[in-house]
Image (tube, helix red, strand yellow):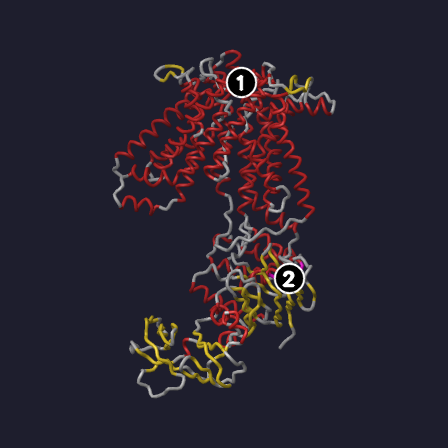
Amino acid sequence: MTAAHVRLADVTKRLGAHLAVDAVSLDVGEGAFVTLLGPSGCGKTTTLRMVAGFYQPDAGEIRIRDRLVNEVPPHRRNTAMVFQEYALFPHMTVAENVGYGLRMRRVPRREARRRIGEALELVGLSGQDRKFPHQLSGGQQQRVALARALVVEPEVLLLDEPLSNLDAKLRVRVRTEIRQLQERLGKTTLYVTHDQEEALAISDQIAVMQAGRLLQLGSPSEIYLRPATRFVADFVGLANFLEGDVVDAHHVRVNAAVVAVDRPISQSGRVTLLVRPEMIRLVPTGSARVENLLRGRVATMAFLGSLARYWIAADGAEWVVDVPAPGHEVFRGEVGLLLPRDRLHVLSEETRQEG
Amino acid sequence: MADPGLAVAVAAVGALLLIFVLYPAARVLTFPRLAEYLAVTQNLRWLQAARNSLQMMVLSTLTATGVGFLYAFAVSRRDLPLRRFFQSLSVLPLFAPPFMVAFSYILMFGRVGLVTKSLLGLDVNIYGWQGLWLVQTVAFFPFATLVIGAVLDQINPTLEYAARNLGATEGKVMRTVLLPLARPGIAAAMLVVAISVLADFGNAVVIAGGFPLLATEAWFLIEGSANLSGAAVVVALLLIPTIGLFLLERFWVGRRVYTAVSGRGTRIEQPPTPPAIRWGLFAGCAVIGTLVLLVYVGVLLGSVASVWGYKWAPTLAHWRLGLAQGGAQLLTSVKIGALSAALTSLIAVVAAFVTSRRDLPFLKVIDFLAVLPAALPGVFIGVGYLLAFNAPPLLLAGTSWILTLALTFWHIPLGYQAAHAQLKQIDRSIEEAAQNLGAPGLRVLWDVYFPLLRPAFTASFITAFIRSVTNLSIVVFLVTPRNLVATYSILAMIGGGFWGAAAALTTALLAITLAGVGLARLLLGVRLRPLGST
């Protein structure tokens, strides 16, 4: 692990009576791409704006490369930001917009012109420098905003839901471009989104937030496969939950059945198992196997191209099961749900109390 | 298309506008003979009046716009102390009778002024161009504030954050971002103010003294020597710069306003204003606000002080005298105001409806005529109606109808533009749905558009009412002993030295207009935005 480039320690912020950010601690490594993910109102944008210096924390510390920046005004931070609605200056051309930060830094004109050109080339907008923002498409405006942030060679790049104003196809393309650019430049990046798919696709690390608190920090696969809490599991991807009592380190009793789990269980008493839809295999009811097999009845099915999604009533709950690469074969009526013992995840204790 | 009801509406609106807008305007321009126009170059007094009008236009526009910008910028800052108070304060003068600032400032700052003589012991002559300059600045800065404020409000606060994020200090944000973005608004405000200053009759007639101006000269010509063609020439002269400014405003500035960045991002709160700037703005607002408040204080005190400047003991004698002499006219004013406001709104809504429908050349004419009165100074309309309707077939002179109609058609643009703006918001599919279900053209207007246009209708009704009740520039040409209205009586009282009674009647008039504003708030929950010339 590299040294923390941006460090938040117990950062707390109230907005009016609302506790927007509640003792959040987070380290962003040099060159890392960290995403703050959560539903609206979870405090992710407030956290980002504190790093930018628009808000000052009520408590806690924000350090950028070991320098305490709590009191540093936004224009002295070099934390260039891409805003959700881009915030391009409508009265300035593309070149003037991109050059604004350089102007504020008194970069000599010749050098500024060169860097503006390079930045526009970087985002694929060469030759558009004389246009005004309203003459550009949404995607192009987005790139101008990105170029404007990158051209000042910021210490940290901040992005606040930069893709939310783009249509779905473009969103996927631009997010890939942002990630490639970030990797190429090795720029430490803090990214805010409420879109879990976007977060999984783009990040080195994801920080899931809810009600001002940081619930879990981890790589995309950790967040998806080993969520710390039921909220995280539910917010990131689709989830089936199974409640049961621990029998021993490898077995949980769920109603009448016993489910085997490969990873040793440290808790005792009642636990919650997470089963992702694509982990489950559907089998005909006549199957000979009994271990980790639940019986259910198909309620409805949706064909989604690359997969078929079933909603199945089983064990007193509704289950979501994804069958990858579906053919013409369709399950109807009674089916068996086979739970893979090597991929079942037991949520930690604290979750259950909260849920 | 082949809808008889619609055709009737087009014909009716078209005919009304031709008779009551185009005809009087044409009458003014064609009334004087060519030689009389050419004689202008020899008439030193008129040339002086023209020069003076332009001089006041430049001076008052600069100060009123400057003050208006400062004020608008101040109240656009969410953290300005007493922001709400200052906001409502700047709106008040928009609804005051157009001579009120001048009248009140004579009471406050004149030779026997409360401030100048009684408090400071000075001997000040406020009559003349300096006094008019001060009065017009105070009277018209709210127009500038309104226009500039609307532009400032549209600036997305995120732009401020973006500039700060890219390294700009607070001062630089203002210079490089806020000011350039407000520039089109400032230009528009200057034009609006300039038109108002040029056409300002009420303040000029009360305070300009021996300083000749185009707006008042026409009235002096008619009152003094019944010189109709002279008056027509003078108002025609006044029309030249007014129309020029109006066209500039509509076709040049109107198109240069930057619309805020698209996108549906959540609006974020403005960054805090640095304390030094915040308190500086507060001080500015306090000074301007005091000047505005003094307008009201002056008139209120004037209505109850025994003998202004000499005996301050309170008395109700002025109220008794004022209401005895002007009570009936006050009632006439209200009646005429209500009727003309209703007509204005109705005609405006129908006109906006028909012109928004399809592109026929004839509709372009209606559109032009419905907007034209906004470019015509009140004195121009007054002279026009005087010349156009004092002979059969339309002998209206001396009746209250001539006042009603003049005010109705002068205010048409208010309602027309409001209705047009609202129509743009209404999706065509609503209308198509109504047609699809079998509603013919006018039925669509009645069933769909009237209910949806009700806010525009109500707003234009109340605005037109207030402006009609307080109008002086038109009625001054059209009143006779048979159709006297309150504003004219007040003017006569000021002229005759009955300041107390004039102040009492002005206060009563103000109470009526403020009741109208309150009613609008109640019915619409919005602020009125009365724009156009005085």
Residue A270: x and y, percent? Answer: 49, 78
Say what amino acid the circle numbered 1 marks: Leu
Query: Dot 2, how many residues are within 10 Å of its Cα: few (below 14), some (14-19), or many (20+)?
Result: some
Which residue: 66% across, 45% down? B278
Task: Give the labeled residue for mark 2.
Answer: A78
Marks 1 and 2 in Cβ contact (< 8 Å)? no
In the image, residue B396 sits, relative to residue A84, either above or below, namely above
Residue A344: x and y, percent? Answer: 46, 80
Residue A154 left/right relative to A238: right
Which residue is at the far bottom?
A: A288
Say what amino acid the circle numbered 2 marks: Asn
Which residue: 53% across, 27% down? B511
Q: Is residue B371 magenta?
A: no
Which residue is at the far top?
A: B225
In the image, residue A38 sits, relative to residue B395, either above or below, namely below
Marking on residue A143: none
Quadrant of residue B207 within the rendered picture:
top right
> Could you tell me what secondary structure mostly forms the magenta stretch?
loop
In depth, the one of B171 and B71 nearer the eye is: B71
In depth, the one of A140 and B406 nearer the eye is: B406
Callout 2 secondary element: loop
Q: Which segment did they paint magenta?
A: A76-80
Task: Give the labeled residue for mark 1.
Answer: B323
Residue B145: x and y, percent? Answer: 57, 38
Task: Report the chain holding disc 2.
Answer: A
